Amino acid sequence: MTERHAPGLAAPFTLGAYTLRNRIVATAHATAAVTDGAPTEADAAYWRRLARGGAGMVITGGTAVAPESALPRRYLTEAWRPEIKDAVRRRAEAITEGGAVAIAQLVHLGRETLGAGTSYAPVSAAAVRSPREASAPRPLSTEEVRRVVDAFRISAANSMQAGFHGVELHAGHGYLLAQFLSRVNNTRDDEYGDRIALLAQVIEAVRTEIGEHPIGVRVSVEPGAGSGLGLDDLVELLPRLSAAAPFTYVNVTTGVRNTYVPGMATTRPPLLESVARLHAAAGLPLLVSQGFRSAADIERALGSGADLVGLARPFMADPDFAHKVVAGDERSVRPCTGCNEGCRTFEPTGSCSVNPALGPPESVTRRPAVPLLLTRPGSRRGPVAVLGAGPAGMECAMTLARGGAEVVVHDPAREAGGQARLAALGAHRTGWQKIVDHQRDQLAALGVRVVLGATPTSAELDGYSRIVLATGAREAVVRVPGELRTLTSTDFLQQYADVVPQAPTVAVLDDGFGWWQGISAAESALAAGAREVTVITPGNGFATGLSPENRTQLMNRLTGAPLRIVPLTTVDATTPGGLRLRNVMDGHESHLAADVLVTVGERLPCRPSIAPSDGRSVHAVGDCVVPRRIAHAIAEGRAAAEALAPVRA
């Protein structure tokens, strides 16, 4: 990559008539805190908190320009409706009061229904089916395309009247404007057969409404040689577009639906090596986005030609990301792991698995969490023992220490991290180690004593006035009779690099829920060089428990791998050279050759019995209550600390 002398990420940047306080942009995302197409008070609270965290510019997403682009649950902002301007104004004011430049991103989904369906027929440039949809869309007539132009114009005008500083036109991720830019999807023979024609007209129409205020255009490099909108296409189209219809900045990202939010297997920004080429082609301020999580990568992008660098999920994990990075305090940033769990559910709103302060609309300051009280509330004041150095225990200890409590963490394991550390051992799952490292480093900075490799005795525990059990869970052993070597998924993840070379044909018996234990066992076996991996599941498919983004990206990674899936099947017994399988529907039996069997068992809570003691309280949090997700563990750990917070004079 060619380096150039460039201002650092803390340097201001002039965008039209506005000055951004730094080069870090919160790019378009949304939490779905929207009711009947109008942003709620919780929505404004989210953007206010984010803007106060120091981003130079904040771009709001999830904003549709036409009824046919709305979703049945109506959690996209319906920008064409003038009657919601007051609600949108609260959003804009929240951002500007926080000191950031406020940009509203506008989108028409076209043929992409986000998997939710719409009340209208999907439309596009032509009747070319999306790989993510079951049916081809209806082609827009020439007159209907002109109405799309007007829809963007009206929505831009409404957004500006609500107090935004500018707008960004979403022409990426496979949505309608991108469908017209694509040489594969745009097969028209009218004036809009020119791939830039629609977007150019939209820019010109929006300019008539908003004057010299910033207009950004977001485009994306779509994956695959035959996508019709790869990097070469963008390098060709961007100069033509800016010459035909001048705009203020270009925001370049990658991917389409289910790939544009990369999971933790993506460890570096995908466009980092292409920044210099994009800078040369753009000819105007360049905002480059996706996969940026560190100051070093941001600085590399700026040094290669980017003017601004965009992030989204890192701001959900830590809204103070920009302030901390600008101040040189990156170590204190609560890291985005790339897990794509809470932030991609929208049930009912987007959240963050590692940030318990991001809650649903009815509780905007935190995720609901109730630690289990195992004794009567204690009256004693004094040191707190946290048993367990996993995500729940470390979050509890961090919060207690920040509140002034004396706290000691105990864990019989030799390393901190619990189930998160175990998960991070799997191939393509190292993102979990980020939150483990963060919590461990924060405990060290706070001076919290962490005792590893030993279990405290009853006598030692008597010295504590309050105890928090964060002792996690264990995997049940699935009893399969026979002679083949059999390991739990826990044991396999800890030693697969040694096991697979000696046992290259691997079978994984999933529990039927399609979650990461079985998936990581299969991926890790392949990463270690397995000759063949077979996943056997009593469920009806593979990876069925994952979010659409995680599942799509997983399947892309596994394409071409020596992997077989055997659904609706279990293992009745093993033999010296394989397995005896039984179909759970019709009972049909078959044999499968294998060198080792990996089983996925139920996760069972590990909760020691603590003898009652006068005035001492005992709480339990996380998996030792009921095994669930890391989001529950972290939220309950913090909630327990807040319940135990010392009374200060």
Image (tube, rainbow, N blue to C red):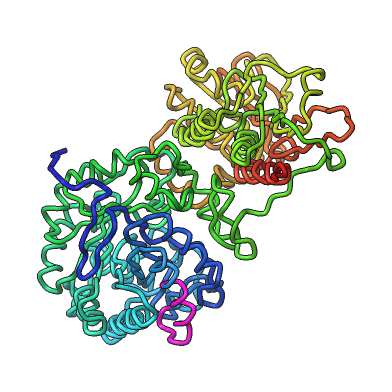
Q: Nearer the viewer, residue 460 or 596?
A: 460
Q: Nearer the viewer, residue 230 or 317?
A: 317
Residue that appears at 38% across and 68% down: 96
Measured as percent of width and height from the top left, residue 395 is found at 60, 38
Characterize the magenta stretch by its predominant secondary structure. helix
Residue that appears at 18% across and 57% down: 233
Q: Is residue 473 visible?
A: no
Q: Residue furthest front?
A: 649
Q: Nearer the viewer, residue 547 or 98?
A: 98
Q: Which image quarter holds the N terminus?
A: top left
> Can you tell which quarter of the image residue 397 is in?
top right
Measured as percent of width and height from the top left, residue 77 is found at 46, 74
Q: Is residue 65 left or right of residue 467?
A: left
Residue that appears at 23% across and 41% down: 300
Measured as percent of width and height from the top left, residue 366 is found at 61, 54
> Can you tell which quarter of the image residue 242 is in?
bottom left
Q: Which residues are magenta?
A: 79-92
